[in-house]
Amino acid sequence: MFSHIMLGGNDIQESKKFYDATLGALGYEPGVIDEKGRLFYFTDTGIFSISIPIDGEPASHGNGTTIGFAAASSDLANAWHAAGLANGGTDCEDPPGWREGATMKLYLAYLRDPAGNKMSVLHR
């Protein structure tokens, strides 16, 4: 359904440090910064990217917006969370752990990136 997701960031190097650590914990390669200063993470199924907003205004988080990444295990979800906290992220929501969904148990962890964007990781 999605080809890519692009979020605003205020400091691309700070974002790269955070996302290289968190996405690296899930097994992804470090991001690449293009000639326009945008940060990209390429996968077989889509692209995740960070850019300074083109309107010149500071990046801001979307109230009610959460970007979720898949984790192959609860251990990887915990590694993602720890890497984020160690690399400029801040804790939000409940601590990492199992939640009862309507039809299944889910392991979830949440962080805010350096620009305040809300991220999560989910293991089913």
Image (cartoon, rainbow, N blue to C red):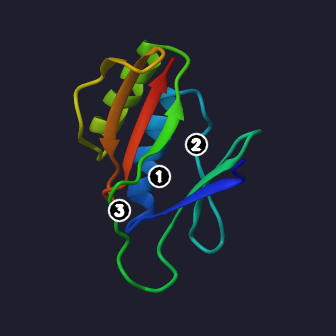
Place of residue 38 in the rendered image (x, y in percent of width and height, measured from the top left): 58, 66
Give the mark, 3 or 2, whose residue is nearer the N terminus.
2
Residue designated by label 1 = 16
Query: In the rendered view, does 103 fall on the left or right side of 92?
Result: right
Amino acid identity at mark 3: His
In the picture provided, is 63 more to the left or to the right than 13? Answer: left
Q: CA distance from mark 2 to mark 1?
A: 8 Å
Q: Residue at x 47, y 76 (%)?
A: 53
> What amino acid is found at the position of numbered circle 2 in the picture?
Pro
Residue in the image at 52% along x and 81% along y: 54
Task: Tell me where residue 28 sits by quadrant.
Answer: top right
SS at badge 1: helix
Q: Is residue 122 left or right of residue 117?
A: right
Q: Pointer 1 and pointer 3: residues touching (CB < 8 Å)?
A: no
Residue furthest to the bottom: 55
Closest to the observer, 116 or 67:
67
Snapshot quadrant of residue 107: top left
Q: Residue at x 56, y 17 (%)?
A: 72
Asked whether 118 or 29 is in front, the reply is: 118
Return the x and y of residue 30 as percentages of the image width and height.
58, 42
Badge 2 or badge 1: first in the primary sequence: 1
* Classed neighbour count for the residue bearing mark 1: other residues with Cα under 10 Å, few (<14), some (14–19), many (≥20): many
Residue nearer the viewer, 56 or 37: 56
Q: Which mark is residue 74?
A: none
Task: Say which residue label 2 marks.
Answer: 30
* Mark nearer the viewer, 3 or 2: 3
